[in-house]
Image (cartoon, rainbow, N blue to C red):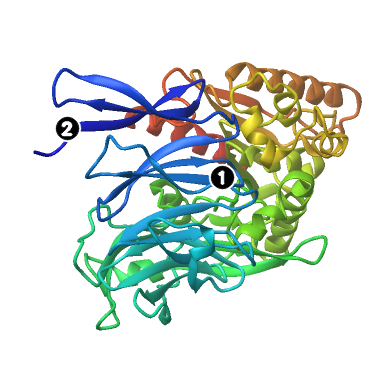
């Protein structure tokens, strides 16, 4: 008789640190299975694709630890795969009696695939795949006889196919050049050497593809209008940052006429080693169809060129991301796309740090800024360890309470701390009343300080033809940082943002 059990986590003060199991075979009983003591670590659960093991994953920003629960004996104590090591992240899959471990352990400190026995230490991990240099691992899928690695390489999507028996890369497959984001099929087959996945971009709706490893054939699984897809230009270029680093930039536009006067919308994130969101959004396609140019800046601090790209833009290196963003906008203008008076900047969440910093440091580069649930007061947040995420976030932003260098670095770029009277662009902030990660009170404090500075400049230093910038906030009573709005509220949010952009860029 199969076990009727449920493993689950419990969120406390925005953190999941405990795992419980509830037994439904008789009178329901619940007991604690695992508890994480270190506040830097978050706990989540995963089931291996073959459903042989449930994994308890405890992860910080820089290291991890995995425990295995045998699904055939769910009441046995979890077995530790490898104790956490500083700087080493790992994730576990299982197939045919072996563990397949994606890890940053070893040199170079980028993701690699290891094979190991179920019970054994790290000395028994044997490498079977190493990613190409300056590549980003997007996802991994285990097939019957092969492992497929989805990569971002040179700012384009690729697949590397590795034999599970021999461990050699049998082939590398370049995916269509218009594709910028990928999502594997949520319901894969177990016994197959064919993989299905969706490709998309901000202006191309998701299209399902399949790839047969045995036939080396990439096929479109659904209706796909190639002519419509190719009508939108996708340009990949690189901007030279202040220190000479080349920063990837992706540009979308239609047609060739009047590019120098087109409205332009710049996107940035640059934090946590995460890629800039390049998934499809109908409003982005609408903007391109209406003649806009969309620019995506893959700055340091993000993950587009691998783990090291993140390290080059976090902690004391956060200024690199700001320099990269400035370089990207200047580069795009120099290439003949738009001009500052027709340019706007968009960012969300932690992307607000770089956007807000550039808003203070180089306000003449753009006319307007749209922020959604932005992180704007890094210094105050990181100085208060009583806040729910401060300790966990120290590996990204620093520890200004105890580290003088971190304090000075954050103070130098923090958007809230560096507001001064000057000629600012206009700004619209979308906020959520129930947002615990970016509380409304902090955004209101930012708005008040910014309005005071703008008014001071207007009254004392402004030229006769200068106008006060519009400093606006759109507060949604529903939704939060990680929860989607209703369909109707989402439409209202996007409509408010687009109305603001059209007004500020005089369209």
Q: What is the x, y in percent for residue 410?
A: 79, 36
Task: Kindly state the secondary structure of the residue where label 2 is placed.
Answer: loop
- Left or right: 120, with 54 as reference point: right
Residue 205 visible somewhere in the drawing? no
Q: What is the x, y in percent for residue 443?
A: 64, 22
Q: Nearer the viewer, residue 15 or 374?
A: 15
Q: Nearer the viewer, residue 207 or 11?
A: 11
Q: Quadrant of residue 289?
A: bottom left
Q: Residue at x 65, y 30 (%)?
A: 391
Q: Mark 2–mark 1 contact, CB under 8 Å?
A: no
Q: CA distance from mark 2 to mark 1?
A: 60 Å
Q: Earlier in the sequence, mark 2 or mark 1?
A: 2
Residue 259 visible somewhere in the drawing? yes
Q: Nearer the viewer, residue 313 or 74?
A: 74
Task: Kindly state the secondary structure of the residue where label 1 is placed.
Answer: loop
Q: Quadrant of the C terminus?
A: top right
Q: Residue furthest left?
A: 1
Q: Residue furthest right?
A: 460
Q: Nearer the viewer, residue 275 or 460?
A: 275
Tell me the residue that label 2 is attached to: 4
Q: How many marks?
A: 2
- Which circle marks residue 507 in the picture? 1
Q: Residue at x 81, y 38 (%)?
A: 406
Q: Is residue 446 above or below residue 191?
A: above
Q: Is residue 403 above or below residue 304?
A: above
- Which circle marks residue 321 in the picture? none
Q: Residue at x 67, y 41 (%)?
A: 396
Circle 2 residues within 10 Å: few <14, some 14–19, many ≥20: few
Q: What is the x, y in percent for residue 366?
A: 71, 46
Q: Nearer the viewer, mark 2 or mark 1?
A: 2
């Amino acid at each position: 008789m199969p076990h009727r059990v449920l493993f689950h986590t419990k969120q406390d003060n925005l953190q999941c640190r405990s795992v419980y199991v509830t037994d439904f075979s008789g009178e329901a009983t619940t007991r604690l299975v695992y508890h994480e003591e270190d506040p830097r670590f978050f706990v989540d659960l995963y089931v291996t694709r073959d459903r042989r093991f449930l994994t308890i994953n405890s992860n910080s920003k820089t290291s991890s630890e995995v425990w295995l629960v045998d699904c055939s004996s769910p009441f046995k104590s979890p077995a530790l795969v490898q104790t956490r090591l500083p700087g080493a992240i790992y994730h576990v899959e299982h197939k045919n009696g072996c563990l397949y471990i994606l890890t940053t352990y070893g040199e170079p400190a980028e993701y690699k695939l290891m094979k190991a026995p179920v019970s054994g230490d790290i000395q028994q991990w044997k490498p079977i795949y190493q990613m190409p240099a300056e590549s980003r691992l997007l996802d991994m899928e285990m097939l019957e006889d092969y492992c497929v690695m989805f990569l971002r390489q040179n700012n384009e999507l690729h697949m590397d196919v590795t034999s599970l028996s021999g461990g050699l890369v049998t082939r590398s497959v370049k995916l269509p050049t218009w594709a910028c984001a990928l999502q594997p099929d949520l319901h894969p087959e177990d016994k197959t050497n064919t993989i299905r996945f969706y490709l998309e971009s901000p202006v191309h709706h998701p299209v399902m593809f399949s790839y047969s490893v045995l036939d080396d054939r990439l096929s479109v699984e659904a209706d796909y209008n190639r002519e419509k897809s190719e009508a939108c230009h996708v340009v990949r270029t690189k901007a030279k940052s202040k220190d000479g680093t080349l920063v990837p930039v992706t540009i979308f536009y239609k047609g060739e006429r009047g590019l120098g006067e087109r409205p332009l919308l710049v996107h940035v994130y640059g934090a946590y080693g995460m890629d800039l969101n390049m998934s499809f959004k109908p409003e982005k396609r609408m903007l391109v169809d209406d003649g806009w140019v969309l620019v995506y800046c893959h700055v340091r601090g993000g993950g587009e060129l691998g783990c090291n790209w993140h390290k080059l833009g976090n902690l004391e290196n956060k200024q690199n991301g700001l320099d990269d963003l400035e370089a990207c906008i200047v580069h795009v203008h120099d290439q003949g796309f738009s001009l500052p008076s027709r340019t706007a900047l968009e960012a969300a969440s932690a992307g607000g740090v770089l956007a807000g910093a550039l808003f203070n440091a180089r306000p003449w580069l753009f006319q307007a800024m749209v922020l959604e649930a932005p992180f704007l007061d890094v210094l105050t947040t990181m100085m208060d360890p009583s806040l729910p995420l401060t300790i966990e976030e120290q590996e990204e932003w620093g520890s200004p309470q105890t580290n003088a260098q971190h304090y000075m670095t954050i103070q130098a770029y923090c958007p809230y701390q560096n507001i001064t009277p000057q000629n600012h662009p206009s700004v619209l902030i979308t906020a959520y009343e129930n947002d615990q990660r970016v509380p409304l009170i902090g955004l209101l404090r930012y708005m008040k300080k910014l309005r005071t500075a703008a008014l001071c400049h207007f009254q004392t230093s402004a030229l006769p033809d200068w106008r006060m910038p519009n400093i606006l906030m759109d507060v949604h009573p529903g939704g939060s940082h990680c929860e989607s709005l209703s369909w109707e509220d989402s439409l209202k949010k996007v409509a408010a943002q687009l109305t603001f952009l059209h007004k500020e860029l005089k369209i």
